[in-house]
Amino acid sequence: MRVSVVLCEHTMDRYDDVVEAAESVFDQTHDDVELVLVSDGNPDVFERFEAEFGHREDVRTRCNDRNRGLLVSRNDGADVATGDIVAFLDDDAVAHPEWIERLVAAYEDHDAVAAGGKMVPMWVDGEPRFLPAEHYYLIGATHRGFGDGVDTPGEVRNTNGSNISFRREVFLELGGFDADIGGRKGDANLQGGETELCERLHAEYGRGVRYVPEAEVAHKVFDYRTDPRWLLDRAFWQGYSKRGMEQFVAGSGDEESAFLGRLLGEFVPGRTRNLLTDPDPVEAKQLFWLLLLTATVGLGYLYGIVRWG
C-alpha cells in the first residue's frame, strides 16, 4: 500500500523545521512512502525543495502561484500524490519511524476509510508544569479525555490535522478540505478544517477516523506557545470556533460536549480530591489553569453565540 505524505511550507523562517519533518518521513519503516512537498506561493521555498529533494524518486514538489493557505495547499498536494493513502503532516512536527506502518495496519486490518494517531508534545524550551493535560489540544497535542482515552484505539470524529490520513480516492471524492472554512464562512478566526471534512466523511460513508494511538507524531511546542497570554488567547478563539462550526456543520460539537461533561464531572472533581488528600503546589496550579482555560473557552463560545447566533 503506497502512502503519500503531504507537507506544506510558506516561509523560509520555518525551513529548518520542515526539513526535519521531511527527514522523519524518509526514516519510515514502511517501504512504500512518497513525500509531496508544497510551497504555498513562496518561490524561495520551492527552489530549496527542488535543490535538496528534487532528485529523489520518492519526492514530488509543487508551488502554488500565490499564498493560498494550508487547506488549499493540502488539497493541491493530494491532487498530485500517487499513493493509495494520503496523509498530512505539519511543518513543525516529527513523525515516529513506525507512524506510517501503524496507520497502514488500520487500513489493512480494519478496512478504515481514514486513520490518524496520537500527537505528543515536543517541548522545545521546557515543559510548562502549570498546563493541564486536559488542555493539550491548545498546543496541538492529544489531550486527556480524547475519545475513549489517549491510548485506546477506536473510531473518533477526527484526529489532529498533523496526524490524519484518508484513502486518497475517498479524500478526492469528498472534495478535500473546505479551503474557505474561514473566508467563505465570514471569519478568519474560524478553525476546524479537519472537523468539517470528517463530518462530511461520516455523512457520506457512515464512518469516522480510526484512531491509532501507537501512530505517534511529535509536535514542537515553542516557547511562545507556553506563554499564559498566548494560551488564553488560543483558548478564547477555540471556543469561538467551536460555536461557529456548530452553525455550519450539524453535530460537530457532540465530541466537545462529551469532553466537557467528563471535564466537569470527572477530571475536576478527581483533581480536587487528590489535592485535598495529598496537597501539591504543581497540582494546585494545574487545577487553577484547568478551570481558567475552560472558562476562557466558554467565553469564546459565548462570543460565538453573539457573533453567529
Image: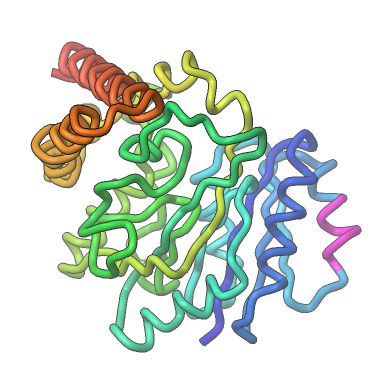
Apparent side of residue 151 relative to residue 125 in the rendered image (left or right): left
Name which quarter of the figure residue 296 lies in: top left
Residue 140 or residue 265, whichever sits in front:
265
Task: Identify the coloring.
Answer: rainbow
Which residue reaches farthest right?
Answer: 51
Against 222, residue 55 (above or below) is below
Q: Position of residue 13 (x, y in %)?
A: 77, 34
Residues shaded magenta: 48-54
Quadrant position of residue 56: bottom right
Q: Please say if 211 is above or below 72.
A: below
Image quarter hosting the C terminus: top left
Q: Position of residue 224 (x, y in %)?
A: 60, 24
Q: Is residue 51 magenta?
A: yes
Q: Residue at x 13, y 33 (%)?
A: 269
Q: Nearer the viewer, residue 29 or 67?
A: 29
Relative to 12, say whether 73 is above or below. below
Up the image or down, 167 lies above or below 65; here it is below
Q: Residue at x 28, y 66 (%)?
A: 152
138 on left or right of 8: left
**Residue depicted at 70% across the width and 73% down the height:** 27
Magenta residues: mostly which secondary structure? Answer: helix
Lateral position of residue 213 relative to residue 83, left or right:
left
**Residue 162 place in picture, x, y as percent:** 50, 52
Give percent across and percent down for residue 54.
84, 66
